[in-house]
Image (cartoon, grey):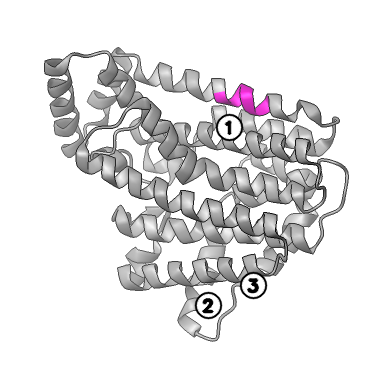
Amino acid sequence: MSKIISKIRKPIDSDVLVFNAILKDNLKSDVSIINSIVNYLIKTKGKQYRAVLSLLCSRLDGKEPNDSTYLSAITVEVLHVATLLHDDVVDDSDIRRGWPTINKIWKNKLSILVGDYLFSKALSNTSQFNDLNCINTLSDISKRLSEGEIMQIEKAINKDISEKEYFKMISDKTASLISAACYLGYYSNDKNEIKGESVKKFGEYLGIAYQIKDDVFDIVGNIDNTGKKSNLDLKKNMLTLPFIHCLSKLNSKEKNIFLRNIKKSSSSSDIGKIKKMVNDLGGLDYAQSKIEEFSILAKNELSIFKDSSFKDSLLLAVDFNISRKF
């Protein structure tokens, strides 16, 4: 784990230990192969970004985490992992966070079914809240997650997506869950509607910036620092913000030439040529400017809260995303 992630987590190190213990217990099954796969998932858990944000937000007003706090963090983490299992099957990915994916080891059928098992656990957890607001929030993000993913596939088939549609798509498929993680964490300890709305917007803006950063990695990243192959999205014709910006500056003929060159370079894994083309048209700079724009919006939403180590960590999480290499 990088030093900056350790610094972000430091104010809640003890909370994370409790979280992981409850998470492992929450996912136990009577079916041994489910437990084997779940244990592998926990072993390769990555940053647990959403859970950490949820736990930090729960402490913004100086209160200790409670049962609802941990249930919130666990539910959003389980939902996130479930979507990853399904995504890896859809994308035919064999590497995730530098480790072989579940579908690579156990094949697609088990990957999908264990993803379904995790969704069922999230549904079971949702029923335990006994709070209509929590249930509505989790129901809404479940819908948005699915719509965002399906919209991405639809736009890939059509090979056409506007910038407005792109932001709607990433808001649903990525930002919705980060927003819910932050909001439910805060809401578990405090029902202040104004502050709760600020936390929700903080998560939404951060989530958008986070996905744009991931989309930049699909162009400039590599398996050593991102834990996955570059250009997976591009090979499936899923145009992201840097490409959308480039295309907006071209006429119809130039667009066709650009797309043809991109696809040709992608098929030959010539990442250098792709990066040069996108760079020359300002796509990467534009994406970076949007990351910074949404990061400022996210930070502004936290101005309503008093200074604390937890607020500092959330602000640091925003800065981490701007500069992260994985």
Residue 147 pos. (x, y %): 40, 49
Q: Which residue is mark 1?
A: 205
- Identify which residue is drawn at 75% across, 46% down: 186
Residue 306 pos. (x, y %): 86, 31
Q: Residues within 10 Å of mark 1 (few under 14, many from 20)?
A: many
Region of the chain picked out in magenta, as a range: 294-299
Q: Is residue 47 above or below residue 222?
A: below
Label whose residue precedes the other's in the sequence (3 or 1): 3
- Identify which residue is drawn at 82% across, 32% down: 305
Question: In the figure, is residue 22 to the left or right of 169?
Answer: right
Q: Amino acid type of disc 1?
A: Tyr
Using the rendered image of the protein, determine whether residue 58 is visible from the camera's viewpoint: yes
Closest to the camera, between mark 1 and mark 2, is 1
Q: Residues within 10 Å of mark 2 (few under 14, many from 20)?
A: some
- Identify which residue is drawn at 16% across, 39% down: 267
Could you say whether the residue bearing mark 1 is in a helix, strand or loop?
A: helix
* Mark 2 vs mark 3, CA separation in Å: 11 Å
Q: Which residue is mark 3?
A: 26
Q: Which residue is mark 2?
A: 35
Question: In the figure, is residue 60 to the left or right of 125?
Answer: right
Q: Amino acid type of disc 3?
A: Asn
* Mark 3 vs mark 1, CA separation in Å: 30 Å
Residue 36 pos. (x, y %): 49, 76
- Choose between 309 and 43: the one closer to the eye: 309
* Mark 1 vs mark 2, CA separation in Å: 35 Å
Closest to the camera, between mark 3 and mark 1, is 1
Label whose residue precedes the other's in the sequence (2 or 3): 3
Could you say whether the residue bearing mark 3 is in a helix, strand or loop?
A: helix
